Amino acid sequence: MSTLRRLLFCTALLVGFILLGAQALGMLAAHRYLNAQLTQQSEGGAAALAWALAHASSSHEERAALADELFEQGLYTQVRISNEGDASVIERNNLEANAARNGDWRNAWLMVQAPQISRPYVSLDGGARGTVTVQADTRLARDTLWQGGVRVLGLVLAAGVFWALFAINLVRWIEARTSRDICERVRALAPGHNAPPSGSCELAGVDQALVDAQRRVAATVEEQNAKIESLQSEIYRDPITRLSNRKHFIDQFRAALADKTGEAGGHVLMFRQRDLAQINRHLSRAFTDQWLRSSSDRLRKLITEFGGPTAQLARISGSDFALLMPRTSAPQASVLAERVRRELRSLRVPMDKYGWCRWALAMAAYAPGDNMSDTLARLDHALMCAESAEDDQITPASQAADSTRIGEYSWHDALVTALEQHRFSLSVLPLHAVQGELLHHEASLTLHDTTGGDPVPASIFMPPAVRLGLSAECDIQAIRLGLDWLFTHSAALTVPVSLASLAQSSFLSRLERMLADRPALTVRLIIEVDADGLIEQAADLRQLCNIVTAAGGRVGLSRLSQQFGAMERLHEFPVSYLKLCGSFITGLLYSPGSQHLAATVMTTAATLGMAVYAEDVPDLATQDILEDLGVRAIRGAVVNFALTRELAPDHQWVPS
């Protein structure tokens, strides 16, 4: 039942209850009034008959005549005259009225009663003669009361019928009006669809239309929710790889740093595709996007399998990716990072210049409460160092000095300001031969900041300089300072130059002019470059060798042990010395293969007239092996310590 019908029904019940209550109260009042009138009628009849008998003669006929006269009025059902002994002398009864009263249910239901009123009468002299008893007839009062009740009840029923008809018509009108409004609204919701036609808005059709509209609205809501989820996915997902974007990664990283539970803390692995711009130039954009997407899918599966649900992989820029590993220990993070490194190596695509595209990886640990900007800056700097190292080994982002925990843009401002203000100097260390004679000095560029703190070594600021395209300016500063040093000293000096500088067109021409301006000092200048240049930048390195040798200087190769493939081209370049270093030297004692390879290098170098130097020598046993092989100069933790302990610390850096 609808709300309107309930309201109308309750209103009808209330009105009916009020009317019936009023009728009952009216009937009760009429009943009391009629009973009072019957009592008065009986009393009046008794009084009148007693008075008449008191003034009449004492004959029986006269008394009977008075009783008949009163009875024949039709207002009384009993008239009785009794003597002094209460014996009935004259009695008149309406037997028909008594029978009707006793047999009529209305009399029992209405309960209209007239009492028997008795009055004594006396003679004229005042002597008692008997008693008069009179009882009024109740039929007229009963009929009057019944007819009045029936009339009122009929009026109530008529009003009820009228109200019912009015309510039914009202409900039908409201339903029809509501149906038309609903039809119009349904048509407005679904124009041209399954809305009821105009003029046929029956309630059943409206119900079906509402059901259909509800289904369409539910479908629309579902579609809108899908669009909202899609938009949220677009906000937090990279459109190409479908990985989390930088915003989502930053939010997750900030939440991880705010975690205060017992297992809080973890590691972040950041890796960079160094050759993405070259890939886009040499290959189609569609192929690059597909390669990035498939590579991301494989990395995601790998991380899901071995890193668990908490590890989050994100693409934070065009070529930079990050893996957040919350609540992981150092061994767990290292194992997962190594798996990622191997997977990235297998995902490489061929390049015209470098053979294969290159990845740079760096990893940092974090703890609750660490500064996110500092952690990301350390990772960015470690990535730049990894790029300079020319391999895909994972570079740890250690807690370095404050000057290194700055981002790429801050490095740009710092380096440009230092170049403009010439706030560079050289840190110089001597290199002695095994027999003890001085071979030459080795220089390393240092940067002085405006705060007056300790100088920043090249191992810290050169990787950002390489990435920002400022390596050539820094190397020019180093060569200029080296020539100034040679002007005040008589020994030879080695100045390292990065491979990134050789790739810049203006560097070699500027170098040529500088060497031509000071030919007397150039004969004691040695330019040292990375051995990777023989493989990756052979033309640039050949031009460098021509410029330096033409000016009377020399060229040296560092980190040959990181690129033994360069030995195939050693005979093409006028190199004066080679350097072996790193893990190749530290593991030489326990690797016969490395010892044979070192002997091969010595033989090749001797054939070409090149000296061989060794760095990172860990102990005296390794030193003895190198001396037996004929290495001319040895440097390490326990080698030449007595000669170098009074000198400034060595700031070696890896050129790129």
Image: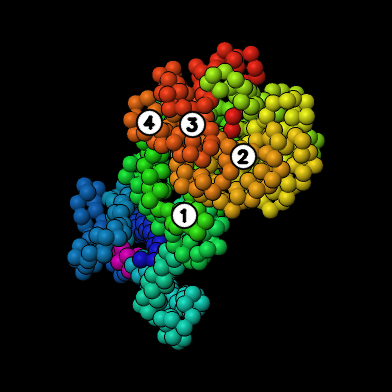
Circle 4 sits on which residue?
595
Determine if residue 453 is in view: yes
Circle 3 sits on which residue?
581
In the rendered image, residue 648, in percent from the top left (x then y), is placed at 65, 19
Q: Quadrant of the N terminus?
A: bottom left
Q: Which mark is residue 355?
A: 1
- The earlier-in-sequence mark between 1 and 3 is 1
Amino acid identity at mark 3: Cys
Q: Which residue range is magenta in the image? A: 137-143
Residue drawn at (41%, 71%), measured in percent from left and top?
Answer: 216
Q: How many labels were placed on the picture?
A: 4
Amino acid identity at mark 1: Gly
Is 268 colored magenta in this rendering? no
Q: Nearer the viewer, residue 313 or 544?
A: 544
Circle 2 sits on which residue?
555
Q: Would you say 570 lies left or right of 596 here?
A: right
Q: Nearer the viewer, residue 334 or 573?
A: 573
Q: Quadrant of the C terminus?
A: top right
Residue drawn at (34%, 26%), measured in percent from left and top?
Answer: 590
- The earlier-in-sequence mark between 2 and 1 is 1
Around disc 4, counting alpha carbons within 10 Å, would you say few (fewer than 14), some (14 to 19), or many (20 or more)? some
Residue 402: name its quadrant: top right
Query: Vertically, is 92 above or below 511?
Result: below
Query: Vertically, is 179 above or below 367?
Result: below
In 3D space, how far apart are the residues under numbered discs 1 and 3 (Cα atoms)? 24 Å
- The earlier-in-sequence mark between 2 and 3 is 2
Q: Nearer the viewer, mark 1 or mark 3?
A: 3
Residue 309: name its quadrant: top left
Q: Nearer the viewer, residue 401 or 425?
A: 425
- Badge 4 marks a residue whose secondary structure is helix
